[in-house]
Every structure is written in C-alpha cells, then in structure tokens.
Image (spheres, rainbow, N blue to C red):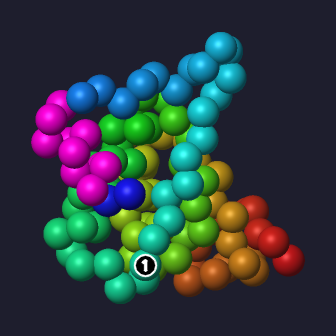
Amino acid sequence: MLTGILFVLRTGIPIQPALNKGRVMHYAGIGSRETPPAVLEVMAAVGERLARLGWVLRSGGAVGADQAFERGCDRAGGRKEIVLPWPGFDGHPSPLCTV
C-alpha cells in the first residue's frame, strides 16, 4: 500500500473526490506503532489530502501511523471517526469505543 501512496504523491495523479454516486467515502488510516518518521510524514500528507477531498478517516487513535493520519485530517479540518478499544485510550478524547 505504501508504494501506491508514494506513487500517487510523486506522480500527482489525483485521488478521486469522496462523493461516489452521492455516498460519502471512508478510508482506514491505520498502520504500525513503530512507523519511521519519514513514513509518518507521508501518512499525514495523505490524511490531509484525503480530508480536503471530503473522505472520512476511520482509525483507532493509536500512537504511530493512526495518529499520523489523524494529524493530517485535522490540518485540513476533515471529518473522522476514531474508534477506541476503551474510553480514554492513549489519552484520546474520542467518544467512540468498542467496549
């Protein structure tokens, strides 16, 4: 997947707008807690770009990749659904949890 993301960023091929036949599109912003810093920057850029196009982030709020996607989404003022394994996971304020 990372190869595909880097391809899109380097070539400038546009990511499609989020509305597909009137439906809002979602993406999963997830990955390793031990993601290298350079890759976290790419993930944040992808999150920001998708948010600007109207895509809704779904993630788990974990340290590392999940939070990188969320940072990018937040920079663009995008919509997000952060589902936590329990209330207050890693100090995250999201009210959504699986418990």
- Choose top left, top right, bottom left or bottom right for residue 91: bottom right
- Residue occupied by mark 1: 32
Picture layout, residue 13 above or below residue 51 = above
Q: Residue 87 location, x and y as percent?
A: 74, 77
Q: In this view, does 95 lie to the left or right of 80?
A: right
Q: Give the amino acid type for the residue marked by disc 1 in the picture.
A: Ser
Q: Which of 40 and 11 is in front in this view?
A: 11
On screen, residue 19 above or below 36: above
Instruction: Please determine whether, in this image, residue 72 is positioned above or below residue 17.
Output: below
* Segment colored magenta: 3-12
Quarter of the picture holding the C terminus: bottom right
Seen from this angle, which residue lies furthest right? 99
Drawn side of residue 72 relative to residue 95, left or right? left
Q: Percent from the top left, x then y, of residue 61?
A: 55, 70
Residue 61 included in the magenta stretch of the image: no
Residue in view at x 40 percent, y 70 percent: 65
